[in-house]
Amino acid sequence: MLTSPYSRPIRRLLVANRGEIAVRILHAARELPDPVETFALYTADDRSHCDLARPHHAIQILSASSYLDIPLLIDLAREHSIDSVHPGYGFLSESAEFAHRMWHEAGVTVIGPGWENLARTGDKLQAKKLAEQCGVPVLKAMSQPTADIEQARSFAREVGFPVMIKAVDGGGGRGIRLVREYHELDNSIERAISESPSRRVFVEKAAVDGFHHIEVQIIGDGAGQVRHLWERDCSVQRRFQKVVECAPALAQGRGLINQVINSALRMAREIRYRSLGTFEFLVSELRGEYYFLEVNPRLQVEHTITESISGIDLVQTQLLLAQGHLLDDLGLGSEVSAKEPPPTNSFSVQLRLCAEDPGNNFALSIGKVTGLIVPSGHGIRLDTNINISGSNALVVGPNFDNLLAKIIVSASTWEATVRKAQRVLADTRINGVKTNIKLLQGVVAHDDFMAGKTDTQWLGSKLPEVLQLGESVSKMIREQEGPGGPSQQSMVYSNMPSSSLLFRKGDAWSLTLEPLGENSSNHPEKHHLRLSKLLHNGFPTSLAAEIEYTTPSSKTPVPFRMQLNTTSTAASALVSSSHRRGDPKNSKHVILPLSGKLIEVLVEPGEVVAYNQVLAFVKQMKMELEVRSPRAGKVQWAYEMENGEEDVAEGMLLVELENEPKIDNGALEVRGKL
């Protein structure tokens, strides 16, 4: 075996991620020919991936932000003698700083292309420069990122609308705005800047109408050999977040696709690319044009469908390349020409099942997943971290991505693949949270999807039609199914009590205890509980918290640790929250239409607001959403935030306006998601 530089055997592997991708990586590591000791990370309210993947060691970290804490991860690597880290996707997977510091400060290899390649490809503008250097077509864009709105505004006027506003370090749909008219520009720039970790954006001429989102899967060994594993079509997306992906591409002629693949190979060879990388393009068969978009220098969410058509385990390939194997050693050394067609009789679709409510502007659905059924059968794969056992059941909250499961279906023809996808979605059931399953049903039932006529603007332009089609399909399924439910099951979980209640630090309750019996006093005693720290929220099955408890006889709060577990005994107590909930029937109330993290409330009592004025910003999974006023009026009361971002629940009263005729009840403007 020849070796690549900076490679060595993996003995102790840390998976610095969570969710279904952590499960996928840990399973792949356990299947390696040489034993690997695995380490997983989890937070107190999110460890289902550890229970399903069974790592050798599970390390608790403080919060979601700890996954991005480079000094902390370096300390953990030193403490546990870890020699390799797999970052998965998201979090630090595209951070050149993370890869560089891990190697130089802890002697740890970060699985991936290495910090040199990350520096040239993880930054969108650097990647565009590489494409231009290799003679690959690119869209006109600013040469340098900026935080100056006037600079961005000037460039947009110069190239003409439509334009894209992009965070230079964004990803997964974050920090991206399509702007078709001038009046939308300033707000879009501001929102993109706020979603960029570096708070820098650039403006790019947009190619949207009639263009497909095509990406090429590249593998390189860092020693000069690179090859492709054909392409994927990821055009079915909403607000730049992918919903359904397929491989290979259908609507585009192979001649144009061959040019795209050759462009990806030229760029990868130029930098002696190492590990997995996805080179993304916008392609229009009608125009005969294609443009380089970006490089994702990491494992991709939709890697599953490439595995399905190629038969190659991409995660294990990543791990083996990191240990110094070359493509020749792995049987992948024979160069595949761009003109070589994809494997015959092999088509695959990935369906992203997410916790969101399409009927409420795709608002995040918070709660505990209490039941899941996914049908079995030839050509069906399920990647998920859903676990509903005990206190470690998966609870969807605002801190992490809302992806619940990836359902992958494969067949020998495109038509058979689509029919299989329709059957699988018809038989899939999930309880405890709202999901986008009706949207998925509408997509795969649509004639345009079967015909491959789904460009990047298709879902956005036909969303009402697709949702209505999904509702019709769902209704027909319920009528045909009867009481028996789906018959074949690859995963079945029983129902458990669930709640979508979002507790947070500062929540408080007054408990009124009234004595019973003839000789008892009729005077009720009022007790007060206030959450000072939430340790685990599995309510109503379990709840762990630190509280401040005040009794009628003492006005000084006493600290306690409270542990709630479901038993067969019920207590009789009247519990009411001190936080105000909105009344949907009250025209004065502006109610939060979604759960998430409240970033900022922009109005105060006494202020006059206009119809559709932005009242607050709520963040879900790093995306900022605007809550707008349903009518004009004067603010009588507004929620006062404490320091920093606050967890908030759907239905909470945000603002109370002076009494005026009712127009609507809470408007949510979504900018850039999903």
Image (cartoon, rainbow, N blue to C red):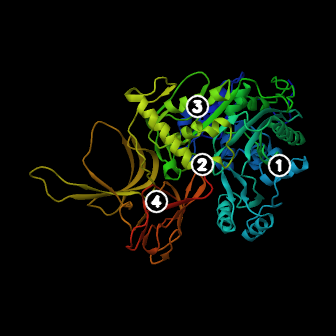
Vertical placement of residue 363 versus 42, above or below? below
Residue at numbered disc 3: 421
| Residue 74: x %, y % from top left | 69, 45
Residue located at (70% from left, 37% from top)? 86
Question: Which label lies toward us, 4 or 3?
Answer: 3
Q: Dividing the picture into quarters, in which one does residue 431 lie?
A: top left
State the quadrant of the N terminus: top right
Looking at the image, is mark 4 or mark 1 earlier in the sequence?
1
Between marks 2 and 4, how big is the CA–CA gap?
27 Å
Dot 1 or dot 2, earlier in sequence: 1
210, 212: nearer the viewer: 210
Q: Position of residue 355 (x, y in %)?
A: 52, 44
Which kind of residue does numbered mark 2 sit on?
Answer: Lys
Task: Tell me the number on the disc at residue 462.
Answer: 2
How many residues crowd mark 3 within 10 Å: few (<14), some (14–19), many (20+)?
many
Residue depicted at 64% across the width and 40% down the height:
448
The three-letter code of the residue at mark 1 reads Arg
Mark 1 vs mark 2, CA separation in Å: 37 Å
Q: Nearer the viewer, mark 2 or mark 3?
A: 2
Query: CA gap, disc 3 to disc 1?
Result: 38 Å
Left/right placement of residue 412 relative to residue 666 reads right
